[in-house]
Amino acid sequence: MRQVKAKVAAALTYLKKHQAIIMERLVFISIFLVIAIPLTILFIKTYEQSTALEEKKVEERIDSAYESLRLRLSSDFNLENSRSYKDYGILNSITVIGGNSRLFSEFFSFPDSSGPYCDFDSLYRQCRKGLLGHFQISHSGELLTPFYPDTSTGIGKSMWDNFSFDDQEQRKKTRDLIQYLLIKLDIRNGLPKRTVQTVDSTEAIDQLYDEIPDLQIPTRVELTSEEEALTYMAETAKNDTTVAPDIPIFTGNNTNVNISDLKIRMTTDYIVFFRTIYIGMLPIVQGFVVDKNIYLNYMTQEEQIAYAKLPYAIELVYEDNVLLTIGKKNAEYELRTKRPLPPPYDKIIFKMYSAEVSGSADLTILFSGLILLIVIAVCLITIYRFTQSKVALAAKRQDFVSAITHELKTPLTAIKMYAELLQNSWVASEEKKQRYYGQIASEADRLSRLIQNVLNLSKLDGNRWNVQLRKERPKAVLDDFVATYSRNIEKQGFELTVSTDTDADNVALLIDRDAVMQILMNLVDNSLKFSKNASYKMISIELRVNNGDMYLAVRDYGPGIPASEMKKVFQEFYRVENEMTRSTSGTGIGLSMVKKLCTLTNMKIEIENAGPGLRTKIHFPPLDIY
């Protein structure tokens, strides 16, 4: 309990003693917080907005990439989806002046799957990279390919009889590949073996969809003439029991051909596009096959160029299998979006990855904010320290005034007292009279030195010290000081010892004699004041030469100076003791003046605890410059 009370009392004492300093620090901390908190909030909001902006840019880029790919795929799909059913046959019938004319379908040409398929004679000019070929599945389930006609039909046999195909083997291999893919993907057609009763019966059409799963619901209608339909049907004109021969397919001069949208199915390497058309009630499956890698690379070539060096990656995924990767996907990338492509590609998932949003702008904002807060803190600390130094200087000046008042009053009081004793003839003994005269002279000398110190400090602060550098022997200056000041040292009960190196006797340097004398006087006065209670009362002065360095050293055997105060003793008006409780006289300007005199006359000062006592060294300019 006593320890707690002691700690509390000590804390209260500390707070009371340092109340002003604590209040000043709290004021500056409050100023910093008032500035820093709003700035911090501002920078955080700016950072969040910048991050949101970067996030928005990423989203815009993702939307742009998806939309660009969607439009390109949709454009390609719409071009093929809008194609007439007649293009899938070997011959097309077109209206000319005076009747109709039959031309080869553009699909009769065999495409090069490694390059874009182009037929510049086609009414529907188109280039599709990776195209293998087009196909049809007749109402009886037979595969028909316009680039490899069926020899069992009249027109097909005629084509083989009248044309020579250099790439016949390649055409057959492609047809067999398409056959294989259709079987593998279960894309089929075929009417049930029965007679259709009513051509326009909705019930019969619905039943047809149920019985043949691959048949698709029509989405558009194409008007065709009997001549166009017969030309298209020429390849499939076989005797077939799936449809009663007495049921007409066409009524009148025109009929509607119902056409569904294209759909797709995929294998590892190929994509099959297919649709169903209905001529009357005859369903026919039409479609084409493309090489998946060639086709997708061709369709995404803009994205591959755009994202080759950007921190993004795009994946096209089908049933958990990656079909294509655009850009370089790093392990640090995160999934930003996952969307299906538009029909009929809706089973293909568009995925886009990017690095985590942390733009350089964000780092710049944070770095700038941190720098600004540091600058504000440094400025406030600088202002605080400057203010503290001014306050401390003012306090020291106040202490100096108190000290100088005390120092002036003491000798003046003594002089006045001795003078009154002598003036009133209160001293009968001649011996006492002489002693009082000596005291008056001593106090007058003390007062004179004090006033001279103040005047010298004023000169030094005002750069009015008249530096007179002359070639002098430090040994001679030391001898003059000893002759002048040794009596004062002895009167205060101290012994003075002086030792010099033999090498120093004849060394002459450019020095200011008055400055050296003033320095020695202040150093000896300090030693006398602070070692007056020492058990060994001696002042030692040394003049040494060591490896081109010549110095004067003044040592006493007093208490020395605490290590924490070593750098402070050269400050103006600084005293190790508290002004209110000090036990020694002085004004706190002695060592400050010594430091300034040394700097002004190209000398250096060094202090160290000698254990016991304090040693102060004054280093003259180096000998090797003379």
Image: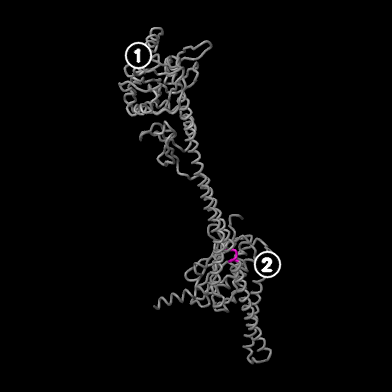
Q: Nearer the viewer, residue 375 or 60?
A: 60
Q: Nearer the viewer, residue 368 or 542?
A: 368
Horizontal side, residue 271 vs residue 53: left or right: left
Can you tell which of label 2 and label 1 is closer to the viewer? 1
Quadrant of the snapshot with the N terminus: bottom left
Label 2: which secondary element: helix
Q: Amino acid at mark 2?
A: Lys
Magenta stretch mostly in which secondary structure? helix
Q: Is residue 580 above or below residue 333?
A: below
> Residue at the location (62% across, 79% down)?
406
| Relative image position of residue 200 (x, y in whole percent) | 40, 24
| Relative image position of residue 76 (x, y in whole percent) | 47, 27
Q: Amino acid at mark 1?
A: Lys
The answer to which image quadrant residue 411 occupies is: bottom right
Q: Which mark is residue 459?
A: 2
Q: Is residue 574 above or below residue 330?
A: below
Q: Is residue 354 above or below residue 266?
A: below
Horizontal side, residue 572 vs residue 141: left or right: right
* Tags 2 and 1 touching, CB below 8 Å: no
Q: Which residue is mark 1?
A: 238
**Magenta stretch encompasses residue 544:** no
| Relative image position of residue 435 (x, y in whole percent) | 62, 85
How busy is the neighbourhood of tag 1: few (under 14 within 10 Å), some, or many (20 plus)? few
Q: Earlier in the sequence, mark 2 or mark 1?
A: 1
Label 1: which secondary element: loop
From where the camera sits, is residue 545 visible?
yes
The answer to which image quadrant residue 432 occupies is: bottom right
Range covered by the magenta-colored residues: 385-389
